[in-house]
Amino acid sequence: MGCLSVRIQVVLHSYLREKLPAQAKGRAALDLPEGATVADVFHRLGLPEQAAWSVNGVLQRDLSLRLAEGDELRVFRQGAGG
Amino acid sequence: MPGSINQRILHVDLSSGKTWIETPDEGFYRMYGGGSAMGVVYILREVPVGADPLGPDNVLTMFTGVPTGLPISGQSRLAINCKSPISGAIGDSQSGGFFPAALKAAGFDGIVVSGKAPEPVYLYLHHAQAEIRPAGGLWGMLTADADEAIKQELDDPKLEVLGIGPAGEKLVCMAAIMNMHNRANGRTGVGAVMGSKNLKAVAVKSTGKVEAANRAAITAMQRGGTKSIDQYPDVKGLGLNGTADVVAFQNSIGSLPTRNYGMGSFDGFESLCGDRMTDTILKERDTCYSCSVRCKRVVETEFMGSKVDPTYGGPEYETIATFGSYCLISDLNAVALCNQICNAYGMDTIATGATIAFAMECYENGLLTQADTGGLDLRFGNAEAAVTLVEQIARREGLGDRLAEGSARFAETLDARALDYLVTIKKTELPAHMPQSKKSLGVIYAVNPFGADHQSSEHDPMYEEGGFPHYYERLALLGLKDVQQPGAMTDEKIRFAYLGECFYSAMDSYSLCQFVWGPSWQLYGPKEMAELISAASGWDVTVEEILAVGERRLNLMRVFNAREGFTRAEDVLPKRFSKPLDGTGPSAGVAYPAEDLERYKDVYYRFAGWDPKTGNPDPARLAELGLAWAA
């Protein structure tokens, strides 16, 4: 990872919102080192690997995906019910 | 009397005004479990072949299950069955609330209603007795008003009341039967059948207590389950944000029906999410009798100057999808008002919202004009028009009178191009999980005896890699040990769908909530379910016995359909599924070709032991299941 940073938006749904302060209502801007991956964000926020997630609206599965400036990472309860 | 069953079934002949109590032996309960399976037994016995679903020959059954009324989560459920006025096939619908537990505590396991009352009536059940009382003064009342009026008449505010609203009285095809005026036995037109019998309501006074063969075991299971909710993320999500907790995930995988099932993702999904509801219009979380999960919503808001009254609860995921994404409406307040109108008049929100979405697509393609709509601009996204149309359907006014027949019959009155936009199976509108995204669910939609249903099997993602360990540990108990790649559609996936369907079918027989009990993600798994039925009844029940109960129900339903003329030819998906989906998202461009489904059905019928030519049950298999009487 380099020393430059990128800013991304994180949107957490369902019970995963509890990983951020309540007043954030599941949303936060995160500054990450350049080259940071989705796995880095999962580790930082304590998200379970079983969660589903998308970057800029596209569902992905490879946690080693690198994030870029302005990306929106959205994390969901992968589930059924309803 | 063993354990938690009363061994008392109430029969009501509304034509003669007679009631009597049947006292089946214990083996009858062990064979069928109660609920929907037991209801279908009576429908097969008593409904003549070819009977008019809205005539006095139809039979309406209301059944609890073996564990109903015990102090544990997810047991207060009621199955209602009849011949469906929508499809002509078997009808089936489930609900929760407090009524099911109260019915059991009043001394009844179920009710079998036949005939037709000469004038409107309601039933009053208490102390294991039944009264038929006049309901002329209640006819025309909204569900909450009728509920209150009955409590006042009987001077008992603690009564549990189940009944129909004006939609059921007017024989609206998608009419529901409501309890607590916010819990719906919504699907397959059961409310219209109740209305056709001039039966407005059933009021129950909970005058006894349901006992378990092993009460200590039930108590321990309830304590353990309540403490462990946080360990089951899917259950925790339901409690936090209601069933609408899945909106975002459904949208992300391209399984959120949008623009009348023409697309799988909705740009406006965010404002419809369960967590958005929690942050905005949620007033409180609600629950059913003795349930710790608390997935029910109560909302308070307004739209078009109309208050949304908390007494009518709040919208479920299905309601949010049908009135929201199906219709391209992203205003949660509008959806909440549509939900309220449906609950007040007593209508199925799935069928009502889906029928309006179908009408919108017909309007946009010139098959309906403003002359047909009475001036309503029925373009997709017009929330005010949708609200107006819900009321028109409920009152059978204007275009609503035509739509009240359901989208399949309505389509028959339009140009043949309407069939390109029609989204029904066995004339029943589809719920909000898309087969283009969940392929094995598509097979279940097609073969399910009462039309497409999202609560009749486990969904594909639960048997695909990437889930929590408990999904796979539990599915292994059903013999499912070959977890599939995401998106795979294999014979093993169809076996998963079939075995999952048998398990869900058993839950609809024992009358258990599928958000609490189930084969994978729920609070309690198959092992615990066997323990529950054993502790309730005193029998030594295994997972294999549970699956057999579920298989019996499915076979009985298919026997009913077969005698009504249904075959493999009716086990099909909507015509539009053969064309690729529009829009964006992971399911854009994806189709579900009819020839693919035919291959899948061959595999499914083999697992089910049904005739591959007709799709109907095999007499030898029926005999093995103890159902030779039904062959």
Image (spheres, grey):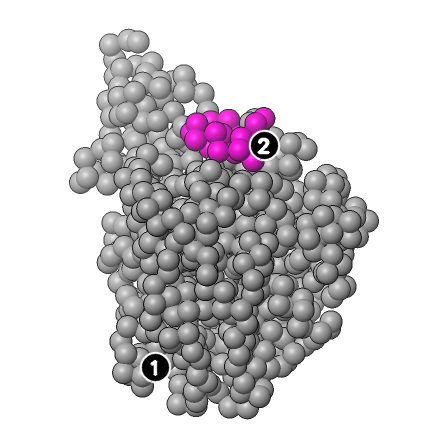
Tell me, yes or no, whether the highlighted magenta stretch contains residue A58: no
Which secondary structure lies at badge 2? loop
Quarter of the image where one finds residue B415 = bottom right
Measure the C-alpha gap from mark 1 to mark 2. Answer: 49 Å
* Crowd class of label 1 (few under 14; some 14 to 19; many from 20; radius 10 Å): many
- Image check: A72 left or right of B95? left
Percent position of residue B317, x then y: 42, 52
| Residue farthest to the front, as pictured | B1
Q: Which mark is residue B397?
A: none
Tell me the amino acid under the disc marked 2.
Gly
User: Residue visible at 28% across and 78% down?
Assistant: B156
Which secondary structure lies at badge 1? helix
Chain letter for the residue marked with disc 2 in the picture: B
User: Residue visible at 57% across and 82% down?
Assistant: B13
User: Residue visible at 42% across and 47% down?
Assistant: B535
- Image check: A49 left or right of B358? left
Against B239, residue B565 (above or below) is below
Q: Which residues are magenta?
A: B463-482
Tell which circle, 1 or 2, labels the residue nearer the N-terminal end: 1
List the residue tagged with mark 2.
B479
* Crowd class of label 2 (few under 14; some 14 to 19; many from 20; radius 10 Å): few
Percent position of residue B375, x then y: 49, 75
Q: Nearer the viewer, mark 1 or mark 2?
A: 2
- Image check: B265 left or right of A76? right
Tell me the amino acid under the disc marked 1.
Ile
Against B592, residue B18 (above or below) is below
The one nearer the camera, B575 or B285, is B285
List the residue tagged with mark 1.
B150
Percent position of residue B131, x then y: 43, 83
The one nearer the camera, B247 or B359, is B247
Against B171, residue B226 (above or below) is above
Is residue B587 visible in the rendered structure shown here? no
